[in-house]
Image (cartoon, rainbow, N blue to C red):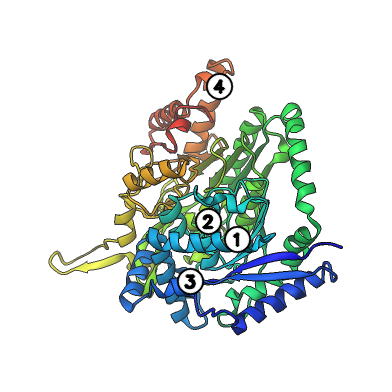
Amino acid sequence: MATALRILCVHGVGQHPPGGAWQQTWEDAIHDACRQVDAERALDIQYCHYDDIFAQHTVSLGDTLEALARLLANGITAPFRRARGDDSRLRHTAGMVVKWVESATFRKQTRDRLAQRIEATKPHVVLGHSLGSLVCYDTFTHPDTRATASGRYFASLGSQIGNPFVRGEYQAGRLSALEKARFWYHLYNRFDSVFTARVSIAADNFRQVDTHFDIPGNADHAAEEYLRHPQAVSTFWFDVLNDETTRITRALREQKPVAARVATPRKRALLVGINEYPDPDQRLAGCVNDVFLMSAMLQEQGFDAGDIRVVLDDRATADGIRERVDWLLDGVRPGDQRILYYSGHGAQLATYGLGDRVDRMDETLVPYDFDWTEDTALTDDWLFERYVQLPYDVDFSIILDCCHSGGMSKGGPARMRGLNPPDDIRHRAMKWNAAREMWVPRELEVAERKQLAVDQSTMPLGDMSGRLGYALPVRTLRLGQARQLRKRLGHKGPYMPLLVYACQEGEFAYEYEHGAIQHGAFTYALVKNWRKMLRGGAGDRRRLKVSDLVKYTSQELRELEYDQTAALAGPEIRLSRWM
């Protein structure tokens, strides 16, 4: 007869008294889930209580306002704009999460409490809900207590561990794998508005499980709904009750040496081109040609045609592009190469923060169905979650043939690849200067803070607070502070892709007529010089630098009499290498 499955439950923020009704609710959900997998298995459910520790770190109105200000300063305010229930719970959670993140004493108290309970109960499984999941992660990664994770299953549910503010302030922008844990399951519900976020970690013992449910009010954050969700049952509970991860991870480990011997690193590319925007005045002519030119170039460089996906014109909607980006970055292994290429319009989007105040200006790509809302914009607020945890030795490049901001041509043969916002949208980022009797740009709070969070020698920010590929949502600390914390944590910070831009900020990306065929001037010059450099270097990429490619491309643009200079950003190690 199998031994009882020992489960330790770690609650989140709120009133969780020992023996309270919440425990029965959790137990009912756990029993319901386990019965669907193994109705005979006995369960021993225990709890880690720490309301008494919370009571020592009360959140006053002033604390809450300060926490909201911190969230506002980083642009992490979407939960308040989409909340449908009592937002006082959100505000209290915000205050408590910020206080826990910023207080080493608070973290040590909760870490020690959990370590003691694990030692006392010796659970097979640890369930961490909401702030309780942060306590678990902290315990399982801290040098003094990380051994408590050894051989145990961990499930984070309704978790803020991937929230940009938490990830930035607490972990300097990058989460670590739980090396000693048997397996970590991150149960994620996209409708949960209590500061939750996706998590992607390249580790054999990690998996995100999508447990989406949409219930009015605050129930989207309820632990019991996560625990009994069908996807949680078929993955997490099935694996735990059958000890399946032992077989799965062993098989993966056995495959790795074989794969390393017989396979070269995989290459994938996603190429997006949009000529036929719905508004005839916004249409371009060379973007589809650019995509085919880039596809040919990549195939010449060893990309298999089957590993290059193309999305054009009316198929390049916001959702269509997002779905294909997920394909592009799915299952990335160390040494893999990924390229995201975009040819179309670019724009800047003034974005609302807390209290419906515009607090930042985000760089955005312009999909076919773009309507100047966040839902149809392709900004780094969405993209960063897909790349920020990539292994450092993955080569992910983003090539953008578009403007950083608006730039619609009012006439003439040279079309510009940028959209100017409608006047009501443009008004968001403007203010009236009575002394000058002129409209001038507003000073945006997030932009000022982000200037201090990046090394502008390799990551030029300009006036924007949201640049594609910069992972700015998790760059919440001043650069010096972040470097110190990264050194202590043993990582290099958030992953940053190589970024190749068609033009500098303040310039425009133009189209070029090559005889009767139209292209983006940048893409045409880039591919021409790419091929020329490879021929000159006899194909030896070790002698070639992407910085030289961008330099020669810019020279070509000037020779073609375009007032346009290609730009480059990324980690220093990538700037001195080839594509």
Residue 79: numbered disc: 3
Residue under pointer 2: 139
> Depth check: 447 or 10 in front?
10
Tell us which disc is closer to us: 3 or 1. 1
Question: Few, some or many C-alpha atoms within 10 Å of disc 4 (few <14, some 14-19, many ≥20)?
Answer: some
* Comes first in the chain, label 4 or label 2: 2
Task: Residue type at mark 3: give it.
Answer: Pro
Image coordinates of residue 50 in percent, x first then y, are: 50, 71
Residue under pointer 4: 541
* Comes first in the chain, label 4 or label 1: 1
Query: Residue 308 sits in which quadrant?
Result: top right
Q: Is residue 362 left or right of residue 337?
A: left
Image coordinates of residue 210 in percent, x first then y, are: 67, 63
Q: CA distance from mark 4 to mark 1?
A: 52 Å
What residue is drawn where x is 54% and y is 57%?
A: 137
* Comes first in the chain, label 4 or label 3: 3
What residue is drawn where x is 45% and y is 45%?
A: 489
Question: Few, some or many C-alpha atoms within 10 Å of disc 2 (few <14, some 14-19, many ≥20)?
Answer: many
Residue 118: numbered disc: 1
Question: Few, some or many C-alpha atoms within 10 Å of disc 3 (few <14, some 14-19, many ≥20)?
Answer: some
What residue is drawn where x is 60% and y is 59%?
A: 119
Q: CA distance from mark 2 to mark 3?
A: 27 Å
